[in-house]
Amino acid sequence: LSLHDALPIYRARLQQVAGIPGILNWLNQVHGIAVHPVSDRYERVPDADAACAHEAGQACIVMTADCLPVLFCDRAGTVVAAAHAGWRGLAAGVLEATVDSLGVPGDELLVWLGPAIGPQAFEVGGEVRDAFVAAHAEARSAFVPSANPGRFMADIYRLARIRLGAHGVTAVHGGGFCTFSDTARFYSYRRSSRTGRFASLVWLQD
């Protein structure tokens, strides 16, 4: 089978293994800040980098291989969301847009940061640092000069915590993985541009 033909089989197997009763809501991720409400059925896969759901059995899902997957729920268990946060989407405000879409105060949310490229492997240019620092001065602490002049090693986990904290979300868990260096468990686009993706999912049970 070609990858195109095999993809529905892999996705159906994922749903079966995870035990998701409803539907999987796939996104065409474009490094933006659009949030798709998965309670709305659609005829084509939407261009979005986050999804939210207020109904049971409808899974929010993002695909990553170095970018940061972020899962959300409220303490009462009435709403969930998933966001794909590469540095562009993170700087543009995809996490803030996701929080706003949930309609829940930030202090009522629980957030999990999934596996992403670690700070020892994530080298970026000065323009990336400038974009984050312009929004939050605290972001300076997430960048360390690299061995290459004018470039920095970035901590995407810390950047996400700063952005979420500034938006009223403090119950943030997870982080600490490195998709680039952990070759046994994770795909990494920076390590190998021809690679797979892994899925991060969250949904409400009945």
Image (tube, rainbow, N blue to C red):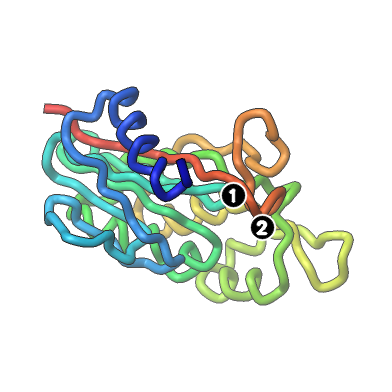
Q: Residues within 10 Å of mark 2 (few under 14, many from 20)?
A: few
Number of the label disc, if any, that sits on residue 141: 2
Q: How many marks?
A: 2
User: Is residue 90 among the parts visible in the rendering?
Assistant: yes
Rendered view: 171 above or below 88: above
SS for dot 2? helix
- Amino acid type of the residue that numbered disc 1 sits on in the rendered structure: Asp
The picture quadrant where one finds residue 204 is top left
Which residue is located at x 38 percent, y 52 percent? Answer: 83
Residue at the outermost front position: 1
Of the residues tagged 2 and 1, which is closer to the observer? 1
Residue 62 horizontal/vertical position (percent):
39, 48
SS for dot 1? loop
Residue 26 horizontal/vertical position (percent):
31, 50
Which residue is located at x 41 percent, y 39 percent? Answer: 200
Left or right: 98 as drawn, with respect to 104: right
Residue 30 horizontal/vertical position (percent):
43, 66
User: Is residue 108 among the parts visible in the rendering?
Assistant: no
Rendered view: 14 above or below 157: above
Give whichever of discs 2 and 1 has the lower sequence position: 1
Relative to the observer, which residue lies in front, 26 or 105?
26
Residue placed under numbered mark 1 in the picture: 66
Rendered view: 172 above or below 97: above
Which residue is located at x 71 percent, y 48 percent? Answer: 191
Residue 98 horizontal/vertical position (percent):
31, 57
Q: Residues within 10 Å of mark 1 (few under 14, many from 20)?
A: many
Report how far apart the C-alphas of labels 2 and 1 lie in the structure. 21 Å
Which residue is located at x 24 percent, y 36 percent? Answer: 203
Relative to the observer, which residue lies in front, 30 or 137?
30
Q: Quadrant of the C terminus?
A: top left
- Amino acid type of the residue that numbered disc 2 sits on in the rendered structure: Ser
